[in-house]
Structure formats: C-alpha cells, structure tokens
Amino acid sequence: MRHERSMLDSGARFVAGMDEVGRGALAGPVSVGVVVVDLTTGAFPEGLTDSKMLTPAAREAMLPAVREWGLAWAVGHAGPAEIDAHGIVVALRLAGRRALAQVRRSLGPVDAVLLDGKHDWLTRPTVDLFEAFDLDPEDDLGALPDPAVRTLVKADLQCASVAAASVLAKCERDGLMTGLARQYPAYGWDGNKGYGAAVHVEALKAHGPTPQHRRSWRLPEQDGA
C-alpha cells in the first residue's frame, strides 16, 4: 500500500483504489470497482493481485477477504445504451461516480482516488461536451464532489486497493454477463463475457445485435444484411 500510504500521509482521510472492466467488450456494461482504505487499514489479503492475473476460481475465492479488508467497497455500472449515447469515456466516469456514491453513504466523501492507467476519466471536464452532467449520481449528502485523482500505470499490480477493486469489478461484471447469457444463449457470454471471441462474432453475423450490444461500435455485420 505504498502509493495509498503516500496519499494518506499527504492529508487524505480516505483513499479509494479504482479499476474498470469491460471497456473493450462488444456487449454488456462497463463496470468500475472501488475499494476505500485509510491509515487504519491492515495488511492486504494474501495473493491479491490484478484480477487478470487470477483464474476465475481464484477471483471468486478472494472476494470475501477483499470485501472484509477495505473500509467500504462498491461496483458501479454504465450500460450499453449509455455507452452508445455518451461514449465510453463518459460511461466510465458515470460508472466510477456511481460506485463512489455508494461508498459515500457509509463513509462520507472520499478525498482521493488512485486510478489505473494514464488517463483521468473520472474527473468531470470543465465544459461537459457530452452534456452528461445530469446523469452524475447524487445521494442524501447532495451532489457528488470531485475527489483528487492520481493516475498510475499498472496500478492494479502495484496498489492493493486498485487490485482489490479490479477483483470486485471483474467478478460482478462476469456474474452479470453469465446471467445475460441465459437470455441470449447464442452469443456465448457465459464464456466470453461479451468480448469479441469467435463464437460471439459468429453469432452476431448469424443473428445480429441484441439490446445488450454497443450498437455505436463497429460490430461484425449480420450475414445478408
């Protein structure tokens, strides 16, 4: 927790690790996990790392320890219709701020966020070119303020809170896609989770997109369309 500790030592009361899953999928939501820590948070669970480095069984086994370790945790989502209407970056922001709104109900405002990658997609732009401000979540504490954001490449491998957030987001989104697979069995979402695997691409060519597909994306065209 070296990076989280430096932010806490700089005056932040609560620091949230945040990570997203589903950005590159053809179908389903984009999901953002958040895990909050402070100076009282103990050692992170043994074996915790970026969710992509863990098997599905290992991720599921890690969930109870991750949920117990952080002060608060949540996963926010933005659906395909929102991705189509506003673009993936705004959808990421909406999902992340929805997750922050959930943890704020138990802790109050989060002061700082550690974000995986180089790009700060969480902070609202000064001028919202996508006119999506009205979608930003509010709760009983009022409008959600902008926390300080620190971006870090490979944060999911270096920061325990970000790794924990990635595990939570991956497990929850995978569960959602497995449930949707029962409604749309041809696309193989229980296995590919909405990404562009061969079975998914072939089903799109045969049957076309569903309401769960990101229709603004360049999807494989249906044969004969």
Image (cartoon, grey):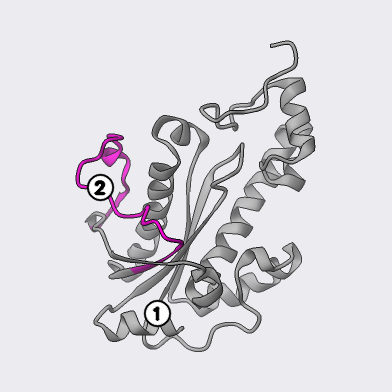
- Report the residue at 27% width, 34% height from top: 131
In percent of width and height, residue 146 lies at 25, 58
Does residue 123 belong to the magenta stretch?
A: yes
Front-most of residues 2 and 213: 2
Numbered marks: total = 2
Tell me the residue that label 2 is attached to.
Answer: 125
- Residue type at mark 1 is Glu
Mark 2 vs 1: CB contact within 8 A: no
Front-most of residues 192 and 69: 192
Q: Residues within 10 Å of mark 2 (few under 14, many from 20)?
A: few
* 66 left or right of 196 in image: left
The Cα atoms of the two marked residues, 2 and 1, are separated by: 25 Å
Does residue 163 belong to the magenta stretch?
A: no
Q: Residues within 10 Å of mark 1 (few under 14, many from 20)?
A: many
In percent of width and height, residue 205 lies at 74, 23
**Which residues are the magenta region?**
113-141
- Report the residue at 59% width, 40% height from top: 28
Tell me the residue that label 1 is attached to.
Answer: 4
In percent of width and height, residue 136 lies at 31, 45
Label 2 sits on a secondary structure element that is loop
Nearest to N terminus: mark 2 or mark 1: 1
Label 1 sits on a secondary structure element that is helix
- Report the residue at 53% width, 69% height from top: 156
* 219 left or right of 19 in image: right
Quadrant of the image occupied by residue 208: top right
* 37 left or right of 166 in image: left
- Residue type at mark 2 is Pro
Quadrant of the image occupied by residue 151: bottom left
Quarter containing the C terminus: top right
* 63 left or right of 123 in image: right
Numbered badge on residue 132? none
